[in-house]
Image (spheres, rainbow, N blue to C red):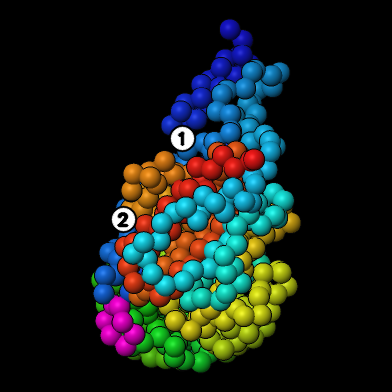
């Protein structure tokens, strides 16, 4: 056998094996290949002003994306062609007939709301045509809970681009002092290992670089200052009850491990994230043989020379992590970064203003929309389902490739992220692996927004927000059943 034919045979075997293991998905090609980060919904469900009740546990360990091929998509191996590398294994769904709006609506309305209570805003849109397939109070602005993170993520991706990185640096200030300068990296860690995924910056790595530069300059003793002045205004959002203190850390442009003292959320948080980061950096410097005589707040000057720096993971990885695990802390940092990207101060007020400007430019802002934070913890936020479905459709179009992480970061029903433990009822199990969606949970508030493909092969964006739910479990189950009913829909006539 010639070498060329041997290579083709080996590559084909690898592709077939990968397809059998579910490692290649054709739902949207690489556009639906999620990051392996996982987690659970971490929006509090406690009463305002009191400790949250029924909050989620720490994130489970990472697991690979196991999306199954979408209905109507071929999963057969293509016939050989005269090239050494295989072409796409899973072809797009055939055009076929488009779903009938009346049929989709009938299926959704057939899902019982017994025990749910309250009201809801709902929207289902054909991604390919933009046609509305279902609308129920779709423009009614309701408390969104964590689906609010979709707006924050879209704004920051649109303004900075998916490859943007945030830099944490060390500058020299005079002959004796160095200053640790926060750049608003939400996932700056105390330390990382080779197995940490996604890879992130750490103060341990920054200390190694800093120590090397200091020793090269024959300096082995310094005073350490730290500057978290990139973000302006209050660190704690005034619309959050004090009882949310185990759900979110006071927002800072400089922190390590998101200020989480026990490593997870919900859990205890530091009240001084910048100071905690500086102490962790000082300890890392001492391990590198540098004597640190003092640690205190300081202001870095524009002209101070940089001696070391580390960069965050790309912004699209950050967004995926925020969405998959419903990370309140990460979302609040991105909210401040939106303000900065618009040339504003990194404050809560300017974040609110810039979110409106950016989403208006994208064509995804409704006059009744109200955004008070980046995470969705605030009960003063208001979003209609049609705003979410419109934004998600934009992310799936070729004109807005910078928003791709809004798709790849969505949890997968029954598989990973905040949907891993959902879709367990008998009439929703078939939708596992087929429905992707961002979850939202607050007291009497439940939401779900994302993508799915019907059995006709039509990709749709959907969003449902229920407020005033009297049955918390019933509300979540209703959302699962609605999404599953659309996913299982043969709705073309």
Tell me where residue 262 appears, x and y as whole percent: 25, 71
Q: Which residue is mark 1?
A: 22
User: Which residue: 67% across, 69% down?
Assistant: 364
Which quadrant would the N terminus be assigned to in this image?
Answer: top right
**Which residue in the rendered view is the most extreme toward the top?**
1
Q: Secondary structure at mark 1?
A: loop
Q: Is residue 268 left or right of residue 9?
A: left
Question: Is 50 contained in the magenta span?
Answer: yes
User: Which residue: 53% across, 68% down?
Assistant: 121
Determine contact: label 1, label 2, CB under 8 Å.
no
Q: Is residue 44 visible?
A: no
Tell me where residue 31 appears, x and y as whole percent: 59, 48
Counting residues from the start of the chain, the first of labels 1 and 2 encountered is 1
Tell me where residue 50 appears, x and y as whole percent: 28, 85
User: Which residue: 44% across, 54% down?
Assistant: 111
Tell me where residue 116 appears, x and y as whole percent: 37, 66
Q: For the magenta stretch, what is the residue range?
A: 46-52
Which quadrant would the C terminus be assigned to in this image?
Answer: top right
Main SS of the magenta part reads loop
Question: Disc number at residue 122?
Answer: none
Numbered label tally: 2
Question: Is 210 contained in the magenta span?
Answer: no
Q: Which residue is mark 2?
A: 60
Q: Is residue 312 left or right of residue 393?
A: left
Q: Secondary structure at mark 2?
A: loop
């Amino acid at each position: 056998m010639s070498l060329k034919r041997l290579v083709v045979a080996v590559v084909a075997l690898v592709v077939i094996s990968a397809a059998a293991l579910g490692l290649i998905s054709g739902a949207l090609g690489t556009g639906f290949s999620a990051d392996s980060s996982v987690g659970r919904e971490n929006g509090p469900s406690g009463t305002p002003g009191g400790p949250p009740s029924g909050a989620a546990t720490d994130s489970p360990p990472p697991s690979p994306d196991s999306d199954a091929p979408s209905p109507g998509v071929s999963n057969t191996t293509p016939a050989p062609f005269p090239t050494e590398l295989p072409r796409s294994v899973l072809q797009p769904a055939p055009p076929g007939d488009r779903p009938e709006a009346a049929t989709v609506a009938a299926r959704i309305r057939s899902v019982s709301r017994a025990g749910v209570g309250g009201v809801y805003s709902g929207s289902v849109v054909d991604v390919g045509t933009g046609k509305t397939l279902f609308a129920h109070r779709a423009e009614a602005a309701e408390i969104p809970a964590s689906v609010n993170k979709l707006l924050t993520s879209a704004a920051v991706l649109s303004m900075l681009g998916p490859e943007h990185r945030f830099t944490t640096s060390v500058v020299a200030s005079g002959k004796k002092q160095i200053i640790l300068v926060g750049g608003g990296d939400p996932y700056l860690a105390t330390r990382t290992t080779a197995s940490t995924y996604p890879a992130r910056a750490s103060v341990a790595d920054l200390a190694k670089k800093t120590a090397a530069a200091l020793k090269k300059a024959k300096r082995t003793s310094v005073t350490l200052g730290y500057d978290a002045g990139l973000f302006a205004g209050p660190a704690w959002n005034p619309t959050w009850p004090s009882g949310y203190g185990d759900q979110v850390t006071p927002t800072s442009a400089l922190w390590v491990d998101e200020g989480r003292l026990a490593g997870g959320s919900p859990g205890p948080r530091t009240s001084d994230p910048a100071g905690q980061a500086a102490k962790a950096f000082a300890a890392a410097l001492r391990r590198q043989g540098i004597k640190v005589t003092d640690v205190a707040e300081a202001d870095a000057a524009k002209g101070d020379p940089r001696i070391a720096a580390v960069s965050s993971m790309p912004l699209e990885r950050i967004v995926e992590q925020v969405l998959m695990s419903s990370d309140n802390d990460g979302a609040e940092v991105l909210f401040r970064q939106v303000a900065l990207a618009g040339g504003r101060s990194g404050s809560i007020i300017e974040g609110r203003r810039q979110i409106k400007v950016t989403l208006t430019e994208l064509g995804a802002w409704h006059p009744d929309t109200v955004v008070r934070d980046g995470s969705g913890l605030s009960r003063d936020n208001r979003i209609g389902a049609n705003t979410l479905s419109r934004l998600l459709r934009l992310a799936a179009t070729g004109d807005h490739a910078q928003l791709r992480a809004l798709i790849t970061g969505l949890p997968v029903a029954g598989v990973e992220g905040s949907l891993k433990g959902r879709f367990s009822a008998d009439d929703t199990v078939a939708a596992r692996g087929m429905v992707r969606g961002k979850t939202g949970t607050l007291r009497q508030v439940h939401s779900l927004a994302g993508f799915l493909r019907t059995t006709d092969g039509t990709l749709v964006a959907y969003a449902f927000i229920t407020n005033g739910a009297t049955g918390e479990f019933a509300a979540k189950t209703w959302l699962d059943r609605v999404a599953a009913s659309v996913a299982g829909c043969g709705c073309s006539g």
